[in-house]
Image: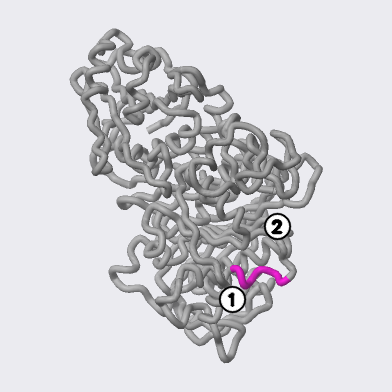
Amino acid sequence: AVINFVPDIPEAGSLEERSALLIGHKNMLTRSGVYEASVKAIAPKGEVSKEALEAAIKALSPSAESDSGDTVPLFGKLASVVSLPERCSRSNCPSRPDALKRLVKGAVKSKDTIIVVVCPRSHVVASACAIARAFPLYSQKTSGKKEPYTVTVSFVLLDVDGIVGGDSLKAEECANVSTLAESVRYAAKLTDMPTCELNCTAFTKEALAIAKSLGSRVSVQVIAGAELEAKGFGGLFGVGKAADSPPALVILSYDGTGGGSHPGDTLCWVGKGIVYDTGGLSIKSKEGMPTMKRDMGGAAGVLMAFNAAVKIGVKKRLHALLCIAENAVNQVAYRPDDILHMLSGKTVEVNNTDAEGRLVLADGVHYAASTLKGHVVVDMCTLTGAQKIAAGNLHAGIMCNDEVMEHACVNAGKQCGDLCVPLVYCPEVLMKEFKSEVADMKNSVASRTNAQASCAGHFIEAHLPQDFHGKWLHIDMAGPVDEADRCTGYGVALLVQLFGQPVMKDELLIPGTPPGPAALSVAEGCVRDGSEMCESCIGEESSGAFVAQGHTYY
């Protein structure tokens, strides 16, 4: 499907020629003006009367107990009105993108369709990404091929007083939403691709193609194969040296500062790009190995977040580092008991070759902080199965050396739909799990019941330079990388929402405010720690302040 996000519902043929979907929370669909705002989609030739629509909306029965929402067909099922679930806890996204994706996927039947979403402005980004995920790009099916079709998406916005149509999207905002949604789709496509199509070399070429498409404002550096070993990348080279396709560190760089700079200008996003994880000599089981093509989901998310951020216009110095390798097995594969000499200068005794992601990321974050001088270093990865035990399949687990940024990340996830929750942050206790008698540390824990997901994050953190005084954020997305055997493109929206320019120009998300309604309800001014007014006015940035309209953490 081709997805078009438009500011206004276009003139379209009758419902005999295409289908239509009107979707939203029931309490929004029942508001006055919904029929008039959506009539060009659901009744261009008068197929559905206002009374018929109102009766259908009244008949919607989204159960407070279940999580399914409800659908009522209109005009012989060529149009439908859909209500999102009523329930939404404090750890969920208010727009319920998880349900929106499922409901849209079930309602659109491979034909030209207009989707009208009735919602407030704050729901647009998460809703757009959810709709994008309902139409995955990757497929190698040879039977039942479908003709291309177009899905046109328009948002009917409620203003701050709840009036339907009292607000609208500008053309620039629609372009930004489209850029973000397509970046999410493409990240999902890359993660869906099998390693026979996307090995280390092919993934590197994909990154180079993205950089080329962004023009001369983006530069690229590739360190690959034996050059990694020569330059001291003991983790990345050690993990990837057994594969036919050599490991690589791909660095995409963009300077959006306009030539000026101030503390906090340099962002480094580091993605785990294990194109296939056999487990190495600590080999995975028959049941555990399938789906390991998705172990590069973090790097795919970083790559496409970089793509979206540059196109939307991030005003920072931004580097995307893709740590690309295949954890394969042959006679030169790294072994348990080997000692790896890492880029950080530290030594690691290998006690589990299936704990490889932290090794490649350790080199990546050290390079980001020491060579690229990142003030904020983020690593994003499908790192541990323990993350799914701690946080579930929908939420990523995050760790940060700064509590305010941790809160900012959680709130950004609620705004964009890439949900996350904090894991335990306690390196002085948990790093004991990696004690080694012959090296600085082992690469896997002694106890598998002692906050494994947090331990893995702390291992990566331990390879930041000793003089690093910036912010480090770890995003373990092993759970939300996929859903129902399809990859999600998780992380693209989260990174853009947290660090980029606002996709929606009047968004009022205040990173750093405590979780809860207050975090999303501040209408004006800059807020620090959710209460104290800072000295910076709206639209300006100052060190240690949080900007309402720019929602940038610094």
* Residue lying at 27% horizontally and 17% vertically, measured from the top left: 54
* Residue lying at 24% horizontally and 28% vertically, measured from the top left: 60
Return the mark for residue 428: 1
Picture quarter with the N terminus:
top left
Q: Residue furthest top?
A: 46
Residue carrying label 2: 374
Amino acid type at image mark 2:
Gly
What's the magenta region? 461-466
Q: Is residue 463 magenta?
A: yes
The alpha-carbon separation of the residues under discs 2 and 1 comes to 24 Å
Left or right: 219, with 204 as reference point = right
Question: Of circles 2 and 1, which is in front?
Answer: 1
The location of residue 280, given as percent across then percent down, is 43, 75
The location of residue 470, given as percent across then percent down, is 70, 60
Left or right: 72, with 393 as reference point = left
Please tell me whether residue 77 is drawn above or below residue 538 in the rendered image.
above
Say what secondary structure mark 1 lies in: helix
Please tell me whether residue 49 is drawn above or below residue 494 in the rendered image.
above
Front residue of 210 and 265: 265
Q: Is residue 121 magenta?
A: no
Left or right: 495, with 23 as reference point = right
Residue 193, visible in the rendered structure: no
The location of residue 170, given as percent across then percent down, is 56, 22
* Residue lying at 40% horizontally and 12% vertically, measured from the top left: 11
Amino acid type at image mark 1:
Glu
Front residue of 496 and 198: 496
Q: Residues within 10 Å of mark 2 (few under 14, many from 20)?
A: many
Front residue of 309 and 80: 80
Q: Magenta segment, principal secondary structure?
A: loop
| Lower position in the chain sequence, tag 2 or tag 1 | 2
Q: Residue furthest bottom?
A: 437
Please tell me whether residue 44 is drawn above or below residue 344 in the rendered image.
above
